[in-house]
């Protein structure tokens, strides 16, 4: 189950604090786009997201989108957020994450992959050798391929040991 198990879980990406990331030695957050960073029904992002991006920037933590979508689609989606991105990431393969880490010039131990899907984001991050954070999807989706993934996710969750919540983990230190 190790390949499906995220290092940590949080409710939403903007629940990650610069302090908890820094305590873990993380300098870059690689993030999925759809349902992790933005919802299909709110492409400009929420005020919480904008505040979180500002806080990450102020703390010197890079946020980079790693998505299976093409350059055009991601470019449109993040135009108002001013974020670097790696398109056609081929998750669950580690290809796009490896490209992003090389581009950033950081050690893998300084990067974390955040996403809402075990079968793409978490598996890709684990395969790439970075730490992984699972978030709850921002909205329920009707896309057929996502629905199929969710079905298998539920089975995997039943077999997996309980998730570690990042903020709880930091409280222990
Ligand atoms: Mg997603």
Image: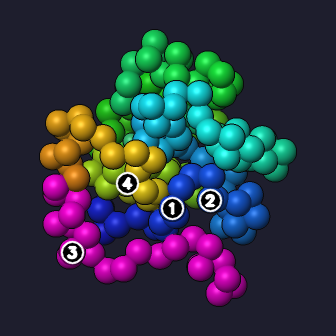
CB at disc 4 and ligand 1 closer than 8 Å: no
From this view, report whether residue 126 is shown above or below residue 120: below
Question: Which residue position holds label 2?
Answer: 15
Mark 2 vs mark 3, CA separation in Å: 25 Å
Question: Which residue position holds label 3?
Answer: 158
CB at disc 1 and ligand 1 closer than 8 Å: no
Q: Callout 1: few (<14), some (14-19), or many (20+) C-alpha neighbours within 10 Å? A: some
The quarter of the rendered structure image containing the N terminus is bottom left
Q: Residue at x 36, y 80 (%)?
A: 162
Q: Residue at x 62, y 73 (%)?
A: 167
Q: Residue at x 38, y 36 (%)?
A: 95
Residue 19 picture location, percent across and down: 76, 64
From this view, report whether residue 38 is shown above or below residue 139: above
Query: Disc number at residue 122?
Result: 4
Residue mark closest to the camera, 4 vs 1: 1
Q: For residue 101, what is the image quadrant?
A: top right
Residue 3 picture location, percent across and down: 30, 62
Residue 73 seen in this snapshot: yes
Q: Are marks 1 and 2 in contact (CB under 8 Å)?
A: yes
Residue 128 picture location, percent across and down: 41, 49
Instruction: Tell whether position 157 is magenta.
Output: yes
Residue mark closest to the camera, 3 vs 4: 3
């Amino acid at each position: 189950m190790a390949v499906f198990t995220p290092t940590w879980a949080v409710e939403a990406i903007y629940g990650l604090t610069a302090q908890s990331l820094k305590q873990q030695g993380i300098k870059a957050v690689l993030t999925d786009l759809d349902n992790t960073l933005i919802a299909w029904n709110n492409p400009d992002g929420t005020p919480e997201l904008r505040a979180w991006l500002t806080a990450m920037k102020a703390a010197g933590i890079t946020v980079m989108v790693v998505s299976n979508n093409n350059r055009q689609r991601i470019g449109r989606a993040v135009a108002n957020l001013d974020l670097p991105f790696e398109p056609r990431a081929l998750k669950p393969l580690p290809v796009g994450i490896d490209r992003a880490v090389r581009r950033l010039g950081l050690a893998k131990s300084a990067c974390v992959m955040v996403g809402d899907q075990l079968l793409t984001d978490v598996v890709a991050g684990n395969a790439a050798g970075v730490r992984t954070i699972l978030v709850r999807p921002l909205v329920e989706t009707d896309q057929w391929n996502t629905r199929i993934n969710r079905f298998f996710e539920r089975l995997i969750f039943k077999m997996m040991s309980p998730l570690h919540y990042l903020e709880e983990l930091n409280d222990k230190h």
